[in-house]
Amino acid sequence: MFTLATPSPFVAAAEGEGGFHAPTIGEFFPDAIFFAGTPFEFNRLQLIRVIATIVILVIFVIAARRAKLVPGRFQNGVEMVLDFARVNIVEEIMGTERARRYVPMITTIFVTILAFNLTGVVPGLNLAGTSVAGVAILLALWVFVAYWAAGIRQHGLWGYIRANLFPPGVPFPIYFILAPIELLQLLIIRPASLVIRLTANMVAGHIMLVLCFAATNFLLLEAAPALKAISALTLAGGIAITLFEVFVAGLQAYIFALLATVYINMSIEEEH
């Protein structure tokens, strides 16, 4: 999220309308496609999210309609994703019996974030659907409502608040410090931790990709002949970061879903 204030030796070779163009915050807020200036404004980022959602639905509808007792490769791939969310995230944290209620929710969160993250490395899309905080905020609010509802259902409203704000075994004067901190955690810190981690990682990944490939384009097409060979290094860096971004896309989906499960489970447990 920066601009080059002083031309470097790499940029100096370009003149006129050329030159190296660093990524800016504006890339995450593209111009409207429809309904500009209205609450219903629709831009390229929202189009990317719609495309990713359609792809998810098509994949799972096809998998459901063609499900067989002996699965093929396509069905195996879909089932691996679903089993990973169910077994390695929800059941791992909550146990089999307790997990049943929350498997659909956590699986939806995991698959949605994974798909939206991967749009950042898809040619023609090139922007993660989670690189602006809107999606992360909506999912974090869903988790917020879920862990409050789970805690209240398990302990009652006052029982849930008391268990979190006034844990047993703490000297009474400490409650004046501990209770506000715990309340802040329940209301703000937990949801914010989900939103900030996901959005920051996707923004950073996009910036690194744009820097590498923009530098490659500039060095190869506009820089002085002595500098053109360096474009091979920036291209290799761009490819490496693309592969790393695929890993980060999966990792961030896993972390978000895992933390969501942990927060819900903490609300249900007798002791926190």
Image: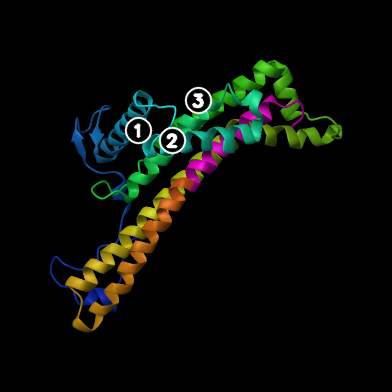
The residue drawn where x is 26% and y is 46% is: 125
Q: Nearer the viewer, residue 161 or 262?
A: 262
Q: Nearer the viewer, residue 208 or 64?
A: 64
Quick one: label 1 or label 3, which is nearer the N terminus? 1
Q: Quadrant of the C terminus?
A: top right
Quick one: label 2 or label 3, which is nearer the N terminus? 3
* In the displayed structure image, the side of residue 220 where residue 2 appears, left or right: right
Q: Residues within 10 Å of mark 2 (few under 14, many from 20)?
A: many
Marks 2/1: CA–CA distance: 8 Å
Residue on which the image places disc 1: 56
Residue on which the image places disc 2: 111
Q: Nearer the viewer, residue 54 or 6?
A: 54
Q: What secondary structure characterizes most of the magenta part? A: helix
- Magenta-tinted stretch: 251-272
- Above or below, 195 relative to 167: below
Residue on which the image places disc 3: 104
Q: Quadrant of the N terminus?
A: bottom left
Quick one: label 2 or label 1, which is nearer the N terminus? 1
As shown in the figure, which amino acid type bears the numbered disc 3? Pro
